[in-house]
Image (cartoon, rainbow, N blue to C red):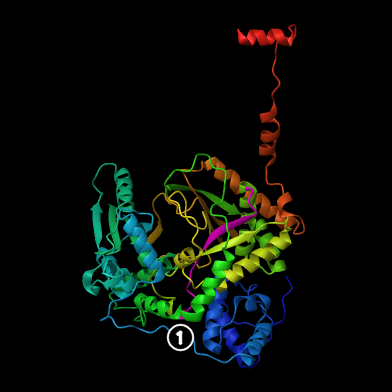
Amino acid sequence: YARAAYAAPKGEIETMLAQIWAELLGVERVGRHDNFFELGGHSLLAVRLVSRLSRAVGVELSLSTLFARPVLCDLATGIVEVLSRADPQDLPAIAAVSRDEPLVLSFAQQRLWFLAQLDAAGTNYHVPLALRLRGTLDRSAWQRSLDRLFARHEALRSVFVDSEDEPRVALLPPDTGLPVIEHDLKAGPDAEATLLELCHEEAHAPFDLAHGPLIRGRLIRLSDQEHVFLLTQHHIVSDGWSMGVLVRELSSLYRAFLAGQGEPLPPLVLQYPDYAAWQRQWLSGERLQTQAQYWRENLAGAPARLALPTDRPRPEQQSFAGATVPIVIDADLTRGLKRLSRQHGTTLFMTVLAAWAAVLSRLSGQDDLVIGVPSANRGRREIEELIGFFVNTLALRLDLSGEPSVSELLERTRRTALAAQEHQDLPFEQVVEIVKPPRSLDHTPLFQVGLAWQNAAVEAFDLPGLSVEPAGNGLDQVKFDLELSLGERDGIIAGTFGYATALFDAATIERQRGYLLALLRAMVADAGQPVGRIELLSSDERSYLLEELNRTAADYPSDKCIHELFEAQVR
């Protein structure tokens, strides 16, 4: 690709922008003619960039400004224009609150606490981690590292006490220690079968939110040189981003303690309870009204359910039993999707979202549908290094009416995704209360399908003397009917297609995977064609549906009249 020659940033705004870009994108230098998205920017980094710019220049900038002006010098000009017509304002910082007063739950924690009251023995909101450790494990240094991590993050030490008015957060003492049960299978018969039983037992053991701890571990010794470590957290104290923080800090602590060194991590200035208190103060007044009004208008009249054809009738109460099939978008198609995204000003996530919406529309016969998308909700720099439940869910309503072309659908999807991200501060639980969709025990409110795009870098354990790889059989629970989880790594988009086994067979999901890949290839080949006319069926499936199922010819006695054949059938 042709690249503009490097030109150094000019002026204070461009220099500040270049510094922020370099830090977020992990590049050495940024020129004034560089494009944020061509340097590796995506939706999550865009949110973090806008947050840092807002803090740096004192006014709130919109995501649409960045997407409209992704080149550094153009964005700097846009910032100057915003500054010229706005009064600079200090955005409220997150400040530490007193631990002597009752601590409040964040909005997301409050929803999970409520769900736990309905199903105290439920395990659908467990966050599991299963690791196979090969090599020499220093169990003392390992336990010390876990205990230090537990003491360091107040979210992990949080318990939720029911008071007269509403639940409150209480903190377990820092010296409580992270509970780890040890099992020695070295001398036992059939260690792998016992291991599977222990993994199942761990995954299905409920947490007590009122007493905690809400994180626990099991260390299973298979031999002197092989262990399996199971770490389970309740979602109310952790999320996907938190797992990256945990992996990074646990590696750092173990390396230091193994070498006989002291605490290697700098102290945390803020903790999750500080964020929860700030969230309730910040999301109020005019800001709350603006966000609430957006979701009220955007989701008004949205279909309560996506009418997908299922292999079995929907049970009266939603089952969370699930399974996955893998999905891989090869390097050639990934390159084509990147090119298509650049041409239409979308991110890879937006392009794949548009494609999957088109597939779901064809399967359901609906041109108005809602897809749930998790948002890391880590725009503010102060909370990037915290473990806690920050993730939010955005209900994106996609419009496929009027036979849009590929280009038009991409534009609609881009507008929808940007508007939702600009109003992502309102917690999903409050959106549900505002919209008041019909409630039923057999499906989730607002949407029943989700698309998760893994933008954050995948953290890997770095433990001296140990090789670390995942253990266990993967996902056996889902929160929605369908869950598409994707991310780009080494030039290939890959992930999993999760599905509720109460509704679908694996073969059905494999066919849907084929439809999505076929539609993506067609979008790359011709962005001007109507999406609704793209052929999704493979030649084999098309032949089966139109020819094999319609082969009705049969031999019959041709020497008899019809009425004689009829009489024979009666007899």
Q: Residue at x 64, y 68 (%)?
A: 415
Say which amino acid is labelled 1: Pro
In this view, 538 is above or below 54 = above
Judge whether residue 92 can be spotted in this image.
yes
Which residue is at a point 30% across and 78% down the rendered structure image?
A: 263
User: In the rendering, at what x and y percent does residue 1 appear?
Assistant: 72, 70
Q: Nearer the viewer, residue 248 or 117?
A: 117
Residue 348 or 193: which is nearer the viewer? 348
In this view of the protein, can residue 489 be seen by the observer? no
Which residue does the image show at 47% across and 74% down from the upper left? Answer: 378
x and y, in percent, of residue 441 in the image: 43, 50
Q: Quadrant of residue 451?
A: bottom right
Say if 3 sits above or below 498 in the image.
below
124 sits left or right of 452 in the view: left
Is 371 within the magenta?
A: yes
> Where residue 468 appears, x then y in whole percent?
39, 59
Q: Tell whether 503 sits left or right of 274.
A: right
Residue at x-position 63% and y-position 74%: 39
**Residue 234 sits in quarter:** bottom left
Q: Position of residue 460 (x, y in %)?
A: 44, 65
The answer to whether residue 202 is magenta is no
Give the camera-side residue of 198 and 29: 198
Magenta region: 365-381
**Residue wearing tag 1:** 92
Q: Nearer the viewer, residue 55 or 421?
A: 421
